Amino acid sequence: MGVQAVTCYKRNEACCAYVLMVTAVYWVSEAVPLGAAALVPAFLYPLFGVLKSSEVAAEYCKDTTLLLMGVICLAASIEKWNLHKRIALRMVMIAGAKPGMLVLGFMCCTVFLSMWLSNTSTTAMVMPIAEAVLQQLICTGLADSHDDSETAEVPEEDSDKEENLDKNQLELLYRNSWYVCVEIEIPNVKRVKMRRDSQYPTKRDHMICKCLSLSITYAATIGGLITITGTSTNLIFAEQFNTRYPDAKVINFGTWFIFSFPIAIIMLVLTWLWLHFLFLGCNFRETCSLSKKRKTRREMLSERRIHEEYAKLGPISYPEVVTGVFFILMTLLWFTREPGFVPGWTSLFEKKGYRTDATVSVLLGFLLFLIPARRPFSSSSCCKNSDDDSESDPLAPMITWKDFQRLMPWEIVILVGGGYALAAGCKVSGLSVWIGRQLEPMSGLPPWAVTLLACLLVSAVTEFASNPATLTVFLPILSALSETLHINPLHTLIPSTMCVSFGVMLPVGNPPNAIVFSYGHVQIRDMVKAGFGVNLIGVAVVMLAITTWGVPLFNLTEFPAWALARNVTGSL
């Protein structure tokens, strides 16, 4: 009887390993859509007797799914009422039109937006604005290239010259699952040819275009690291960690933000310096000066164009105010739920553990479907950025179901669910314990070496495979490795989760890379050269964080009781 039980146990391990390998191959090769590949465990686990069909189905909808739905509601309201465009233009106006400061300004606004919106939608929104500024720079140089090195002492003279130029319209439209349409005016010059080096007035102009384009995709990646909802890989980690270690009450919005925010700031500065050195040189005084006397004619015109785009938005509207209030309220409620150093607002309730970040997210998202987009007791329409239906209906809500559905990434939801299903199968079948035993020879390595190897491995694999798929495959393996080596699982899981986002060397690495590459300013060799430096910067900064301020924040020097309980249970 005992032999039969052992045989059945090993059979379950083999079946689970087969399902894991099949799913991983589909994810890496992308022979079928990622969401479709994530459904493989839903039918193979029941067929092989690893998990019941009802048990597998329960893994496809978790707490993080509701959290994501609430965040998408807010993101839909932000994009519908152009609050994202107002924030981006305002931050660029503050930075100015000098190349170095312009790049830094776009990076800052992209990082901020990517904290709350998906990296893909942030890049798709910011790139047309950046492209409009670059086209202004290019076309002004084609019209009057001999003025490139002259400085503008009096801004009014440039205004008079600009008014004498014939103008036409340039409409930049990027079509993606999220899209933004930016309409600007540019001087009427020679018809622009297909994008080649000869289109740019000077080589320096081409370098500025490369630098600004790449800075946006890197900034979107950096911004996604800051919040637990910033990117899908953070959500995958949070849910798999909380499922595997239910007694560990250490990962929430506040603790993740405290750990990742310094990482993002350091990466932002170092990435900006790296791109500046690579494409603009080391003359920071020339490219970053805020003095009006040092601005060229084209820089003055680009700055004026940004101000004109901001003026087109008009005064801030009532829906923008409501969206901004909800944005701040959601952030505050996330921070103060269980801050750790003081009792949070959940302590006001009698029953503990019932309320999570998803509770706040879904509540505020639901209210956006109820609150009218028109100011109460106001006869004038304030819905200047909405569609005609919203203007004609005085009770039209802030967002509609169509707005929500347009942004909701259902493929990511199913992909994350497939990861949870795989993790559940590995746990039930005992495959994770078996993998941990095979990794025992690594027990002689110090924790920082194990973490470094894991970071380098996932950052290399994610260059060729999707970020969510890579992390979903590696999380169970790294968890089992940490338990076997008696290392705090957070010591390897958090850095690996962050490094999986550093697939920035190729257009196929992630969707933001593909968006930027499609505009034609950069070539693959530019992305490889710049992305390699950003990858090294990211791994180095993450390793610095996990060995310094991460140690007291997550108590990484000890093997925690919640991991020990999980290890003992899995070994039985």
Image (tube, helix red, strand yellow):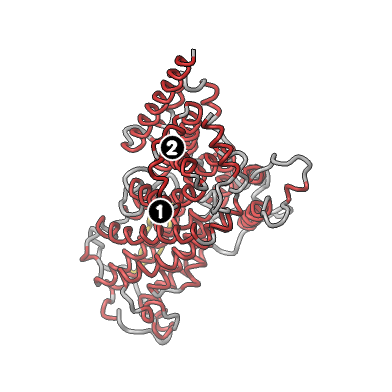
Q: How many marks?
A: 2
Q: What x and y, as percent, mark residue 410?
A: 48, 37
Q: What x and y, as percent, mark residue 550?
A: 53, 57
Can residue 47 be spotted in the picture?
no
The answer to which quarter of the image holds residue 129 is: bottom left
Q: Nearer the viewer, residue 541 or 487?
A: 487
Disc 2 to disc 1, how far (Cα)?
Answer: 17 Å
SS state under label 2: helix
Q: Residue at left 44%, top 83%?
A: 291
Crowding at dot 2, Cα within 10 Å, few <14 / some 14-19 / many 20+, comes out as: some
Does residue 226 sit above or below 269 in this rendering? above
Label 2 belongs to which residue? 436
Q: What x and y, as percent, mark residue 271?
A: 39, 65
Residue furthest to the top: 1
- In the picture, measured across the screen, residue 27 lies left or right of residue 8, that is left
Q: Which mark is residue 496?
A: none
Label 1 belongs to which residue? 449
